[in-house]
Image (cartoon, grey):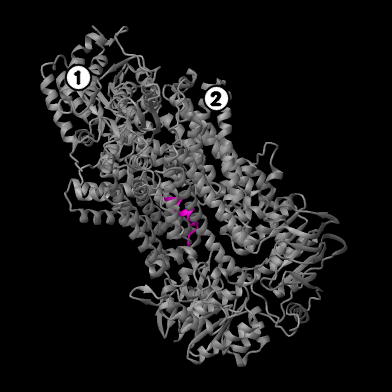
Amino acid sequence: MNHRHHGARLRALPLLAAALFGLAGAAHASDNKIALIPGGPHPYFAPWEQAGKDAAKDFGIAAVDFKVPAEWKLNLQTELVESLVTQGYTAFGIFPGDAVGINSTVEELTANNIPSLALAGCAQDPTKVSFCFGTDVYNSAYLGTKALIEALGGKGKIVHLAGLLVDPNTKLRMDAVEKAASETNGAVTVVQHITDTDAQEAADQKINALLGAQKDEIDGLISTAYIPSVVAAKSLRNLGDKRIKLVGIDDDQIVLDAIKDGFAAGTMAQNPYGQGYVGAYALDLLASGTCTVKADAPFVKTPQTERFIDSGTLLISNANAATYKDDLKKITTEIQTSFKDKYLDCK
Amino acid sequence: MRLTIEGIGKDFPGVTALDDVSFEILPGETHALMGENGAGKSTLIKIITGLYRPDRGRLLVDGKPVDFTSPRDAIAAGISAVHQERNLIPRFTVGENIMIERPPTRNGVIDFDKVHSEARRFLDMIDPTIDTRTEVRHLSVAQMQIVEIAKALSLEARVLLLDEPTASITGHEADALFAVVRRLRDEGKAIVFVSHKLEEVMAISDRVTVLRDGRIAAAGQPIAQMDRGKIVTAMIGREERVAEMGTRSVDRTKTVMEARNVATSLGHKNVSFQLHKGEILGLYGLVGAGRTELARALIGDARIVSGELRLNGNPVTIPDVPTAIRRHRLGYISEDRKAEGLILTHPIRSNIAISVWRRIASALGLITRADERRIAHPLVEKLEVKTPSIEQAVGKLSGGNQQKVSIAKWLAAGVEILIIDEPTVGIDIKTKTAIHELIGEITREGLSVLLISSDMPEMITLADRILVMRDFAIAGTIENTRRYEPMSREIMGLIHAGSADAAPAAETAHG
Amino acid sequence: MTPSSDSRARPSWLAEQSNLIGLAAIIILFWFLFTSLAPGFVSSFNLFALSRSLAVDIVIGFSTMVVLATGGMNLAIGSIGVCAVMASGYLMQTIGLPIPVAMALALLLGAFLGWLNGFVIVRSGVNSFIITLASASLFLGGMLILSKAQTFNALPPEIAAFGRMRWGGFVSPLLLVALAIGAALVVLFRFTALGREILAAGANPRAAELSGVPVGRAIIIAHTLSGALAASAGLMLVFRLGAAMPSIGQDWLLPSFLAPVLGGTLLAGGFVSVVGTILGALLVTTLRSGLLVMQIGNFWLQLFLGLILLAAVMIDRYRGVYAERRSLGRKTNLGRKESGRRA
Amino acid sequence: MSQNRNLTFGQRFLANEWSALAVAIVIGLVTLATLSSAFLTEFNLYVMLRSFCVVLIVAFAQMLTLAVGQMNLSVGALGGLVAIAVGGMMEKWGFPVPVAILCGLAIGAGGGLINGLLTVRTGINGFIITLATASAFTGINLGITESIPFYNLPASFVAFGTGRISALPYLLLPPVLIAIALAFFLARTVPGRQLLAVGGNPQAAELSGIPRDGVIVMAHTLSGLLAGAAAILAVAQLGSAQPSIGVDWLLMSFAAPIIGGAALAGGHISVAATALAVVLIVIIQNGMVLAKVDPYWVQFLLGALILAAVGLNRLRAVRAGGA
């Protein structure tokens, strides 16, 4: 099996980004210290580190640091945030370890005049984050399922592989999958949601058990989390089964290879680099006090929040596997250049 | 091999178990080691077998000093022992237990055929009927004892210590054991034989050493020069040991406790007796006769399945121990102070007040330490418990003072009937007398006592009447004349119904 | 020698407290260290955050402590805590009960689950470790089945407001709740018959039984109390998060043992230290916060906590051995220990 | 109290201990096979056997400490540490696979040795010691990796983790060998018997000249070694060295030996019964996916299974005691 280190690829990306945004930088310099905090250690967030460094350089920010909680636990995240406030950080881009649970921490940040954004994933309304900038999980799951249904030719039985059961986003994704399926008027049925597949061991056990038990009964797999996408792609390859269609999420090399070799129909790409880069840019403006969020900004409404900005989602399939990175870059540039005018009131 | 014990001393918290003990064990002899309960025999054996290290003195093997830091060292030096405690692995077979120290192996793998054939060899010396492939947990107590002896034999040690080897085996098995002991002696081994049974000692020993109160009372005397009287004198320190107690009046018209044909879930049958007000009723019997078990049934810790228990004339059913204490004013002092009697890590204060916490608590369930002290302090003074403070942890007191705390606990509870199980086990002679006087004293104040003891002199000193138990039933009741010789003869007669010439030896406590 | 009933005359009083004094000294040392190296450590923001996590850690510690008193363990406190959390969420959000009623019912549920543990342990005679290991799984599974792992996030706003409330600029009222619970436990273990019975049952169950202590009842009550305390800790987190989440309680095992064991409560039963548990929790919270603020923490934090726990129990052990040796001379099992070491 | 009656009862008792598990397994197999045609397919059998491997060794790791009346809360933490150590050695340092595996096993054994020495030397309850070392091992794991897995493992190693001959995964080989070796060790070798002797009656073992402390240290060391072996297998199975390996081992590690009849007090364990218990757990997990049972029930049923097993054993003990 091919195990190229996707980190190398992720590290190459910022160079391109730096070249792209080189001219946009140095508009102003600020003393802000911005922290970008994922929910826990996860390969998805790796591009944030470089995105932060690039943003600091391009926009003249004192520091944009990538700080990872030791484990994927809300209390570790909130303790990390609290300690960073103590260390003088002035703005936070947070992937909520828990969409609801993060709000009490955010409220405290707001009370201390520290702006925060939800990055990559949203906080559940009512929330005090300025806005949510990320992948619309509901929409992404919905589009992914639509793509899967298309690949299946409009009918069949599908299984949903989801992440942590206790994460409220998982519930949203389950609803989105159900909704996409229900729009086929019964031609496509969701046989089962398999949850808690975010840990490698659990994913391996559960997905293989599923394939072992029901591989002849199911026609498609929709995965809405990183790990199960990788594991499902591996298992299908291991099984040598090209009948079952898989639509995954994120662009792990294993998933991309599976698309290339026909073991997966596609995967929903997200835009982590753009989230980190534009997020840091927006936080800098907000924390400097020069800008506030526009009251009538053209936010998207999602089931989670009324103030959502899409960082871009697109389906990677065999057709665009070679070019999707450029597409994402274009999206990032577009969002960043128009961001100030579109969403902010600045002095 | 010559084993020399030279000036050995050993201290435990609050008590000197051994002091300046010296004697010699020679090859080709059976050496009896005698002494009362608490005289220090077991401690000495534990030192010789490497389980304890002496605080003073030393051991010499063939004239060379040795320092055993673990039983392994002792075994390596050629010393093995049958201890009083059961020392078998329950889920291992008889054969493996016997050969556990050095199982025969072939290419590093245990050769179980050889294990069993070797074990068979040693087991056959005593009892050929036990199957070496049975798991030990399925054996009876007597069979386990035999396995233990076979195990000690298997070590083919040059010094073999037998600590009460006959405590729970039949006469027939004992005879087989003695034959083996004689043979080993004739082969030049040294046998140390610890027993309470005088006739056994007289029959098989060559020399005898007697311990009293942790000191040597007779060292290596040839048995030919001793007679039973001399040994008893050495053991107890005087010829007749029945101390005079102050006079007590027992009102035989008032029966406080009466059992009528009681049978229990523990296996007692047809137990009947009466305990009168102010009386000390002795309960004598061998280990395993069911005395402690009867006490447990009486206080509600085991069930009475048929018959009737009456307290002050009223039939009662006691569901559990707290009810026995609170409603029926019935208390029990266990023979095992450490495991069942006292909470060693807690202070004297709360050990005494434990039985009255509920009573002295306010409506809200509140108690202060002062409340407890008010209860405990007068009793500590009255019973002359020797302690720097009432807050002292009970575990730091001597055995005698611990026993006083136990009694104080029941006085605090205001019990009317107290069952005392082996009151002076592990307590030195001087304190023993004080405890005896204390028991006499509390009955003068109106308490009634059911006294369980394996210590014949203690029984004859204290009891007004003596119930003799055998096989979970009452074998008979004897009025105490306080004359030691005829009393002990009569009691032993009841115990060994049919063999009336049984020796007046004090029985061992539960092993 | 005459017995003295004046407790102040006890020679061992200072020795008895030396563990607590030592613990307090270590805590002061760390505070000094963190304050001088990272001034932000004593900012009112950090102190507030610290006081709030401390409150939860203390109550979690208490929950384990009351069961340790009986010589048992309760591995189910995280599961009981989350059951109470989800019950309170359901009662407030779905049923719409007033906050105090919902909280009281959630506490009752916690107490009931604890009682269930105690009842099964006493009736079956099976080790509390196994029973609570199994019941932890049962309770958590039951909660997930009933709640479908749905977070309750539309709780009355007063909940979150209380969680954010600050007294004196940097003290969370939750900490006062925790300390009040501590005071109640001091009263229980020092001034009530029940508390003494629990300790006696833990120190020597057989002796306690024969002295008339209803040991089974004491164990059941201790577990019931443990359940109620676990529920309290869970509810404190509901206040703090403003939501009832099914992920609460899943990492309580280590902190629940850290606080009481650091504070000198014995695993063998029969002794508890309420103040010690509070100090133990304070040490843990201080270290966690301090190491994070000094930017050492995060990934290495777990290692430090493990090493601190090891060091604490070992120091305690050798202190105890030393004290015993001084007062008793050589003790038997000490000699055995030494021989074992040489073997 | 006739010896013979006890004996036959004892034999029945022993037979029972096996039969309950075996019967449960057979019922499970038959039910699932009838309910779903997919159950007995080659791939499903492969999947079940594959998930059996790691769990079995983890259960053995705990079983050995239970044998001497100890417990090891650090199995998972130690497993995680070994997993990332092996992964790191192969990816970062380019160690050959066998060398990395040996080093990983050595780390596992070393961790167990530390547990054992600390327990024996300090005389502190093994629960607290291993709780503390578990935290320390996890801390080292997180500190080294910052929770980032090692993905680039040698192809041959990863291939071993996924390869199979019809329904038999290559992965099954190590656990089967370990089970046989362990059964042999406990039944026929001197240290193995000493281990059981110390668990059965520590005082007796010591009086019989068995170095009790040494045996306890040995049990912990072997436990650590097995935790390491399980971790290496998990790495092969997953194809990457995840720092999260082991985080959910704890419950399972106790569940299997206890369902297999092990007593916490020590001295009574069974390799075969523990293996059967793991088989039962795997069948139940597989069956739940097959029957599309709500995922929430997994947790619940595992708890119920432990209680049922303990209850059954208790009942038998009570009945045996009454006889």
Chain name for mark 1: A
Residue B266 x/y as whole percent = 70, 63
User: Label 2 neighbourhood size at 10 Å, few (<14), some (14-19), many (20+)?
Assistant: many
Most foreground residue, B354 or C328: B354
Position of D306 relative to B22 (above/below): above
What is the distance, in whole Å, between disc 1 and disc 2 at their CAs?
A: 45 Å
Tags 1 and 2 on a common chain: no
Residue D219 image offset from top left, x and y in percent? 39, 60
Tag 2 residue:
C91
Please state, as top left, top right, bottom left or bottom right, where the C terminus of chain A lies in the image: top left
Left or right, A277 with respect to C20, comes to: left
Q: Residue at x 13, y 30 (%)?
A: A12
Q: Does the residue at mark 1 contact the one at mark 2 (Cβ under 8 Å)?
A: no
Q: Which mark is residue A332?
A: 1
Under mark 1, the amino acid is: Thr
Left or right: where does residue D310 sit relative to residue C305? right
Position of the N terminus of chain A, as image quadrant, is top left
Q: Is residue B134 above or below residue D175?
A: below
Residue B41 spot, x, y in % from top left:
56, 76
Q: Is residue B298 magenta?
A: no
Q: Was residue D265 drawn as part of the magenta stretch in this picture?
A: yes
Picture quarter containing residue C228?
top right
Q: Secondary structure at mark 2?
A: helix
Q: Position of residue D119 (x, y in %)?
A: 40, 56
Which residue is rendered at x = 66% and y = 60% of the image?
A: B404
